[in-house]
Amino acid sequence: MIRFESVTKRFANGTTAVDDLSVEFLEGGITVLVGSSGCGKTTTLRMINRLVDPTSGTVSLGGRDVRELPAAQLRRGIGYVIQQAGLFPHRTVLDNIATVPTLLGWGRRKARARAAELLEVVGLAAESGKRYPHQLSGGQQQRVGVARALAADPPVLLMDEPFGAVDPVVRTLLQDELIRLQAELRKTIVFVTHDIDEAVRLGDRIAIFRTGGHMVQIAPPAELLARPADDFVAGFLGAERGLKLLSLISLQDVPYEPIAAVRTTDTAAQARAEATGRWLLAVSPDGKPAGWLDVHALDGSDSIGQAALTPVRGLTDADSLLSALNETVSSPTGMAVRVDAAGVLVGASRDDVVHAHQRSLA
Amino acid sequence: MTIEWGWLTTHTDDLLALTLDHLATAVPAVLLGLLIALPLAVVAHRVRPLRGLLLGISNIMFTVPSLALFVLLLPITGLTRTTAIAGLTVYTLVVLLRNTVEGLDSVPAKVREASLAMGRGSLGTLVKVEFPLALPVIMAGVRVASVMTISLVSVASYIGYGGIGQLFTDGFQRSFPTPVLAGVVLTLLLALAADAVLVVVQWLCTPWIRKGARA
């Protein structure tokens, strides 16, 4: 789909940003380009929509050299998302999203209708369409950036550190949204980041770049983590490489067993009767795990509601083995609490079960 | 120094005519200045080596005494309003050029890049993105240039197109202070009015700035 053939980019100041790159990016998948700053990953991305032209070699898209089309026309067919969204501050959110359709001559009405539709796709309220970008939070702006890139339904999406400027909680949320969108849209996405965790979460394939514009390795995340090509890649993947690998394995095949629990509305007496040890799982009235209850600390109080609960995170089958491992370490009982898709308690996996599953994979 | 209020009431028609005449010189001068400054500013903004040169020239032209400038223009345009307008235009450039360049500089690089990456051409990006975003800084320049020009028009009295400035020559020649004071007040009011109009225009043209922060 996107193909680089012996592509080299040297800038006027003599630095080589990309050195003899030959690679093909997966059609309908997310390829993440990672590396420290100045490694040429952004330049590589920008050569696809010709914001940068290579010094030598060819970049082709769908079998055609990108230089065949006038730059503007090429770019209208490629979605582009950048850090801090790069939204037009003087246009409303709706007009921002409608940019490319308008340039393509769809007509104002149709372009705006499409923009309104996309607001919903990226999870923004309809009324935010009338706002200006500075009236939105960083995370919302980033969503608008994604919506704007998707507006004309381009087959290819280029994303240059799109979530780099938002806080970690929002970033995780946006990553989840991208995964959800991608499952539906199956775009060919090239995604640049310097965050290896983000790369592992999002990438169908990860390309690692090193300073001087060399692509060192390109592989699916699991393969990359299991078999880094050299010390540079291993170093870049970090000391927790093994743990990152666990983050790619779902809990689907990890067994769980029933677990006794009290409701937060129950009395202290009921809790004491139910408890077999010091700790007891408490669930909210709708069956969702609320926290670990320290039965010893119940002295004197009548209801559980007042007791301080140690936080618990219910894990679904889609969560990773790494998060289960984390729960076994951080919960006072060594149990990873399991929930269904609705968040309702279904049971718990003991730490030895989690560890055994992890060893069985090795 | 006494003011003869009677003179004012008998000369309202003249005062109005002079005010309109004043505007007929000042407004074209500022508009023409803008017309010249915008493209020059784009060049100065895009071509770094030319920036210092263009700004330098506009600075130097500003230091040419107005009388000398009119004298220099006389052989070309004669004793016409064009001479007055052309002379004043030269002075507006120093503010308009500098502010437009600074306005264009103030447009975030990411926004310009996004516009190009969406498939808008270089000219489209300039017109649809860069100029609108530079507008507040450009308008600040237009306001200064307008006030400055309105007060400068008087110097064109030398060649007979001084607008309200004619009152100064008149009062001076007759040692009659009333027209002079009337002229000063009129010029002041005109400058204030022009500034107010420009503030409103800017307000109307920049709806995005009016909207408060995160709602």
Image (cartoon, helix red, strand yellow):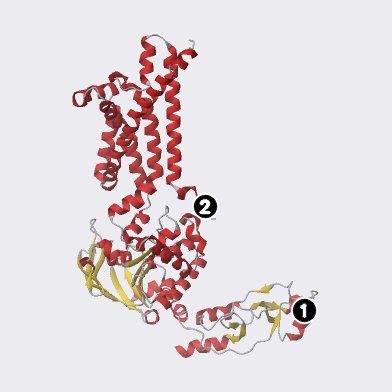
Residue A92 is left or right of residue A41, and the answer is right
Residue at disc 1, secondary structure: helix
| Residue B187 in the figure: left or right of residue A338 | left
Which one is nearer the viewer's eye here, A331 or A131? A131
Q: Is residue A50 visible?
A: no
- Residue that mark 1 sits on: A268
Subunit that carries the residue with mark 2 = B
Q: Nearer the viewer, residue A233 or B134?
A: B134
Q: Nearer the viewer, mark 1 or mark 2?
A: 2
Q: Are marks 1 and 2 in contact (CB under 8 Å)?
A: no
Locate residue A40: give its quadrant. Answer: bottom left
Q: Please provide percent x and percent y for residue A10.
A: 23, 61
Q: Which amino acid lies under the numbered mark 1 shown in the image of this protein?
A: Ala
Report in which chain the residue with disc 1 lies. A
Q: Which mark is residue B213?
A: 2
Label 1: how many residues lie within 10 Å, few (<14), some (14-19) or many (20+)?
many
Question: Of B105 and A194, which appears nearest the observer?
Answer: B105
Q: Residue drawn 75% across and 82% down?
A: A271
Count of numbered marks: 2
Residue pictured at 48% horizontal, 57% vertical: A130
Whether B60 is drawn above or below A200: the answer is above
